Image (cartoon, helix red, strand yellow):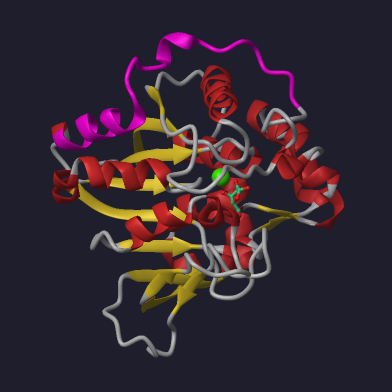
């Protein structure tokens, strides 16, 4: 079976770190490139975190640094959730800087996509700035992209404002460009991320599972200000889970737009489940997840890591 070629665009981020672990050690995925974007913390920190993770995993995947600010709005961060470094809680070794490409993420993605024999799947698990710039600068890449499977958005309420989810809120204009790109999009948002929970007993099991499990256990101790005991949300792993086991999810084909000009709801995903807007469907939205099966899948996949 041939491995699915993917590019992960990310802002590690504790749940990003977990999603990267799963993707990098899964035999069905071929991670061709990792690009970084300002998000959970600033661009320098998320890039450093990505390189620290690759050193930890002993994986030689090229990394390219992308956008340091959103397209238009001022940056926001989520250091209250992931800590000041973006990955507080574990003492990583210094990274191997040689994996860092000497070109912008958008140019690196362009090259990788255009040179690929098979269509590439994009997996954005941070704000969508890099992907939006890619489509504006190099629209020809769309021809060689299979689909976009992203973590972001919500059919209901938000997790950073009343109605907006962090990745979309952080760069709503970019999200608008991506959702109107015409490419097939799978949206794994809060509806599923908030049910993809890891509980303290699971974390304890991870601690002694292997090196990755142990590293994740220590990150989890700091995740969301140490709310370890309440169940931790594996948002970004949902996008990777969809790639590998889509039947974990219940989905709906629908139209999604992004609220840009509103006092209270900027960055909300307008998921038109009832067709009020009379627009063509542009996304497959994950509206539910089998939480027990997800947990099993999650633990099995961390077991495959180093
Ligand atoms: C998303 O926001 C970030 O804090 C997480 O890494 C995830 O990608 C959840 O809203
Ligand atoms: Ca993320």
Q: Position of residue 128 (x, y in %)?
A: 43, 48
Q: Position of residue 194 (x, y in %)?
A: 66, 63
Residue 98, quarter of the rendered image: top left
Q: Residue at x 78, y 56 (%)?
A: 231
Is residue 15 at all visible to an observer of this figure? yes
User: Which quadrant is the C terminus positioned in?
Assistant: top right
User: Which quadrant is the N terminus positioned in?
Assistant: top left
Q: Which of 72 and 36 lies nearest the eye of the viewer?
A: 72
Q: Is residue 59 left or right of residue 225?
A: left
The region drawn magenta spans: 90-114
Residue 100 included in the magenta stretch of the image: yes
- The correct choice, above or below, for 101 with respect to 292 in the image is above
Residue 175, quarter of the rendered image: bottom left
Q: Residue at x 45, y 21 (%)?
A: 59
Residue 50 included in the magenta stretch of the image: no
Tell me how many marks there are: 0
Q: Position of residue 66 (x, y in %)?
A: 41, 31
Q: Residue at x 31, y 33 (%)?
A: 106
Q: Which of 212 and 67 lies nearest the eye of the viewer?
A: 67
Is residue 4 at all visible to an observer of this figure? no
Residue 169, quarter of the rendered image: bottom right
Q: Which of 236 and 23 lies nearest the eye of the viewer?
A: 236
């Amino acid at each position: 079976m041939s491995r699915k070629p993917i590019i992960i665009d990310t802002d590690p981020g504790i749940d990003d770190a977990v999603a990267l672990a799963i993707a990098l050690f899964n035999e069905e995925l071929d991670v061709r490139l990792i690009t970084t974007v300002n998000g959970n913390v600033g661009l320098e920190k998320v890039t450093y975190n990505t390189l620290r993770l690759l050193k930890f995993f002993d994986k030689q995947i090229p990394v390219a640094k992308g956008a340091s600010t959103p397209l238009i709005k001022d940056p926001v961060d989520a250091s209250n959730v992931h800590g000041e470094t973006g990955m507080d809680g574990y003492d990583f070794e210094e990274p191997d800087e040689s994996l860092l490409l000497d070109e912008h993420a958008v140019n690196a993605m362009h090259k990788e996509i255009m040179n690929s024999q098979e269509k590439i799947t994009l997996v954005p698990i941070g704000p969508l700035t890099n992907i939006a710039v890619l489509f504006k600068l190099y629209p020809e890449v769309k021809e060689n992209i299979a689909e976009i499977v992203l973590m972001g958005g919500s059919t209901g309420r938000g997790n950073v404002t009343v109605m907006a989810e962090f990745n979309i809120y952080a760069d709503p204009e970019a999200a608008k460009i991506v959702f109107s790109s015409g490419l097939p999009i799978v949206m794994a948002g809060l509806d599923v991320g908030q049910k993809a929970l890891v509980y303290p007993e699971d974390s304890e099991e991870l601690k002694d599972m292997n090196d990755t499990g142990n590293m994740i256990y220590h990150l989890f101790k700091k995740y969301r200000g140490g709310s370890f005991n309440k169940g931790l949300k594996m948002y970004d792993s949902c996008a990777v889970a969809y790639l590998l086991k889509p039947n974990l999810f219940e989905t709906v084909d629908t139209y999604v737009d992004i609220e840009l000009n509103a006092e209270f709801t900027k960055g909300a995903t307008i998921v038109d489940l009832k067709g009020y807007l009379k627009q063509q469907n542009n996304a497959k939205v994950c509206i539910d997840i089998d939480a027990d099966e997800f947990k099993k899948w999650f633990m099995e996949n961390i077991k495959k890591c180093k």
